[in-house]
């Protein structure tokens, strides 16, 4: 090449130095190696692509047993080829195609085998409950914090009624300190078709949903914001109970709240526990690293939170329909207690067949 090239190119009027001739020779050699590399393996790549395409199109029965058995080996070969190709001069178009093929094959070989329906069956069939039970210590802590918050709210407004306005959200309507028994009674019964009751209940639901999400999301800060949110949110409950207790309507307000409140407060309890679980894992990771401990706790807590969202939806339906259909304290208490027993039994009594995340 070094002798022939100058004479040939010289006749064309183009001259190269010896170094330039060496570069041309190297580039030509690399291109030949790249072509040889591709030709030697292209048959396996095409076979892998054909198998992956059939499976992606739902034609698994059309894949032979031989191809199914060869699939993992073909995938590993393609990945190995990709690693080599990235270090060679393989053309960009082929390299891009090979990267896409290996990604598609990964989902076939290692990706999730179950669809949404199967996941839902495992989730509600015991997986959710198993994750909740794994948080039993944090659930107890969250319950203590919520009870403490309720007591604090009661004591604050009992010492100074002005605290009521600081603790309660807007849209309280006639539910204010100094309201008569008749006025407060009127807010609990016979008002199903009036907007005021719906606005107040919607405000409570919106506030509780936000608290549930924040209590989980802020768990990374060692769980402290989650704990404070649980206390702060239940001070509002304590203030409301104090208001109605002052007019001898404690059972009535408990019944009104219990229709959807047992589900809603249960959801907040679990969300707070999920946040505390992440915070505890970060503060006390044990033998694992902080990131590994937080990741494991996060996966478990995320499954709990998926269920919390479902519980909030159920609470919204109970608030929107059961509250309007039931206009007596006994009926409301029956619904509320039933939901409380149902959730407790589902999480801690019935084990199902699922496994925690």
Image: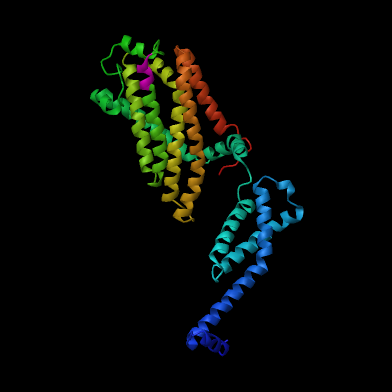
Residue 195 belongs to magenta span: yes
Vertical placement of residue 26 versus 303, above or below = below
Magenta range is 194-200
Q: Is residue 39 left or right of residue 244?
A: right
Q: Is residue 71 left or right of residue 295?
A: right
- Pinpoint residue 182: horizontal percent, then vertical percent: 32, 9
Q: Is residue 353 left or right of residue 239?
A: right
Of residues 167 and 133, which is closer to you in this image? 167
- Pinpoint residue 238: horizontal percent, then vertical percent: 34, 25
Q: Quadrant of the C terminus?
A: top right
Residue located farthest toward the right when viewing the structure as drawn: 65
- Pinpoint residue 61: horizontal percent, then vertical percent: 74, 46
Of residues 237 and 147, which is closer to you in this image? 237
Q: State the count of labels.
A: 0
Q: Quadrant of the N terminus?
A: bottom right
Q: Residue at x 40, y 13 (%)?
A: 193
Which color scheme is applied?
A: rainbow
Residue 248 visible in the current orientation: no
Of residues 168 and 147, which is closer to you in this image? 168
Q: Residue at x 53, y 25 (%)?
A: 341
| Main SS class of the magenta portion in the image | helix
Residue 3 visible in the current orientation: yes
The quarter of the picture where residue 27 lies is bottom right
Residue 142 belongs to magenta span: no
Of residues 81 and 72, which is closer to you in this image? 81
Q: Residue at x 26, y 28 (%)?
A: 166
């Amino acid at each position: 090449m070094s002798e022939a090239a100058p004479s040939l190119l010289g006749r064309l009027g183009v001259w190269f130095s010896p170094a330039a001739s060496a570069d041309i020779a190297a580039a030509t050699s690399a291109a030949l190696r790249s072509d040889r590399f591709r030709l030697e393996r292209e048959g396996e790549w095409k076979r892998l692509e054909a198998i992956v395409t059939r499976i992606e199109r739902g034609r698994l029965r059309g894949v032979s047993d031989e191809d199914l058995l060869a699939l993992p080996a073909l995938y590993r070969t393609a990945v190995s080829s990709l690693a080599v190709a990235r270090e060679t001069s393989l053309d960009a178009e082929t390299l891009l195609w090979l990267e896409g093929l290996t990604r598609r094959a990964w989902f076939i070989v290692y990706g999730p085998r179950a669809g949404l329906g199967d996941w839902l069956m495992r989730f509600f069939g015991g997986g959710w409950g198993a994750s909740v039970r794994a948080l039993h210590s944090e659930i107890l802590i969250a319950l203590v914090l919520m009870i403490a918050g309720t007591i604090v709210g009661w004591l604050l407004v009992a010492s100074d009624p002005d605290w009521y306005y600081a603790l309660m959200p807007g849209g309280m309507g006639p539910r204010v300190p100094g309201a008569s028994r008749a006025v407060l009674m009127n807010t609990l019964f016979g008002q199903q078709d009036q907007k005021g009751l719906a606005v107040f209940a919607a405000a409570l639901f919106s506030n509780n949903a936000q608290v549930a999400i924040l209590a989980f999301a802020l768990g990374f800060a060692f769980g402290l914001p989650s704990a404070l949110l649980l206390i702060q949110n239940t001070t509002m409950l304590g203030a409301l109970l104090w208001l109605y207790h002052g007019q001898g309507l404690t059972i009535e307000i408990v019944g009104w709240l219990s229709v959807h409140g047992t589900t809603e407060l249960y959801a907040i309890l679990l969300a707070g526990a999920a946040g505390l679980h992440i915070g505890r894992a970060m503060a006390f990771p044990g033998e694992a690293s902080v990131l590994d401990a937080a990741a494991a706790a996060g996966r478990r807590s995320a499954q709990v939170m998926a269920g919390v969202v479902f519980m909030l939806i159920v609470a919204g339906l109970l608030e929107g329909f059961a509250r309007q259909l039931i206009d007596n304290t006994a009926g409301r208490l029956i619904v509320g207690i039933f939901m409380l027993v149902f959730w407790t039994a589902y999480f801690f009594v019935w084990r199902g067949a699922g496994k925690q995340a």
